[in-house]
Structure formats: C-alpha cells, structure tokens
Amino acid sequence: MSMRFTTKARRGVVALTVAAGLALGVAGCGGDGDDNKKPDTSASATKDRGSDPSAQEGQADEPLAELRGSDGLLLQIVSAQRDAGGFVTVNATLKNDGAKNTVVPAALSGNETEIVRNGRSLGGATLVDSKGKKRYYVLRDTDGRPLTTTGFSTIKAGESLSVFMQFPAPPADASEVTFQLPTFASGTIQISG
C-alpha cells in the first residue's frame, strides 16, 4: 500500500515539475511583448526590476559565485531563481580555464545509483540552508534522470558550457544558501524571486 502511494506521489511531483516548467516557459516568452509596448521605459528601470532579465543581461552581470574545480574547471553561477512552483533553478557556466582538454569528472554526477545510471550530469550538486539546517538535492524525474544538464564528457581548453540545475526551493526566508558540487569549492549564493 505504501509503495503504491509513493509511486503516485512521485508521479504527482513530476507532473507538478513539468507544469511549472511549462508555465515558466510561457511566462518567459510572454514578457518580451509587454516590454516592446512601453517605449518610455528606460534601460535602468529594466535592470532595477530584476525579475525577468534577458539571457544577455544575465551573462553580462557579475556572477553570484565563481567556484574552482579540478583540472582547470571553473563554475560561474549566473543566477539562482526561485520559481512559483516551489523550485529553485540555478544557471551557470562551466568553463575549462586550463591549457588542455579536460574530461569532466564523473564525481559531478554524485554517487546515487539512480542518477549515475543516467550518465554524466551535475546531479551531485546540493544547496545547503544552514539557517534551516537542511540540504536540498537536485530534483529527478520518475525515471531517475536528474533535472540538470546532462550528456557532456570533455570540455576543450577555453570552452564554456551553459548548465542548469533544479532543486526544491528552501523556505521563502532562506534567500542565502551554500552551493556545493563535488570536486569544486563551496560558495554562498543569493536566491532571487
């Protein structure tokens, strides 16, 4: 009986995750049309709003954190956005700062059998809310696939890769969390939204 309930609960969480992702996609697409209708809006007013920056604005801003890993890898966290559906999406750039090609360590996937079985990913990432004394792991779908960038193995020297990770959202009053990823230094980031 409890196994059946657990399976149904997992399906419900995945359905909620998919619905939240679709809602965010629709909301993100609809925002550009409103901005074009207001010609008197200045660039500084757009920056002050901060709720829906464009991809170019997110990359031009200073990263929330820069974390160094092994073999010249650098993770620059660009944003940590709290979604209406109860999730936090962390967007980052994984860069090879070294002089030679680097094989991305398998440790980044973490050590959970369910995630490792699905190939290379950033499934080992966690958010730590030290105030609430909780650790949040990367979300997974019903097949055990992590809700994060997957399918990468080698990064050429000087090359960058845009990555994302999605976590359950900490309580609303927990806006500062520690981001951890195996083989990388830890860093404190601010959650917006």
Image (tube, rainbow, N blue to C red):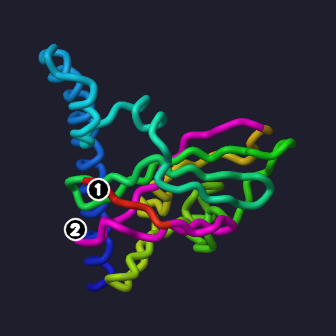
Q: Is residue 118 above or below residue 4?
A: above
**How far, Cα to Cα, is label 1 from label 2?**
9 Å
Q: Position of residue 70 (x, y in %)?
A: 76, 61
Q: Position of residue 192 (x, y in %)?
A: 30, 54
In the drawing, does residue 40 fall left or right of residue 112? left
> Residue at coordinates 41% horizontally, 49% vertically from top-left?
79
- Residue bounds of the magenta highlight: 158-187
> Residue at coordinates 28% horizontally, 63% vertically from top-left?
13
Whether residue 107 appears in magenta in the rendering, the answer is no
Q: Is residue 34 above or below residue 88?
A: above
Q: Position of residue 159 (x, y in %)?
A: 71, 36
Specify few, some or many for label 2: CA neighbours under 10 Å numbering under 14, 14-19, or 20 or more: few
> Residue at coordinates 60% horizontally, 72% vertically from top-left?
113
Residue 182, image quadrant: bottom right
Q: How many marks?
A: 2
- Using the image as rendered, state which of residue 8 and residue 125 is in the foreground: 125
Amino acid identity at mark 2? Ala
Specify few, some or many for label 1: CA neighbours under 10 Å numbering under 14, 14-19, or 20 or more: many
Outermost residue toward the right in this view: 100
In the drawing, does residue 116 fall left or right of residue 97? left
Q: Which mark is residue 172?
A: 2
- Badge 1 or badge 2: first in the primary sequence: 1
Residue that label 1 marks: 82
Question: Are circles 1 and 2 on residues that touch, CB within 8 Å?
Answer: yes
- Using the image as rendered, state which of residue 15 and residue 32 is in the foreground: 32
Image quadrant holding the N terminus, namely bottom left
Amino acid identity at mark 1? Arg
Q: Position of residue 59 (x, y in %)?
A: 48, 36
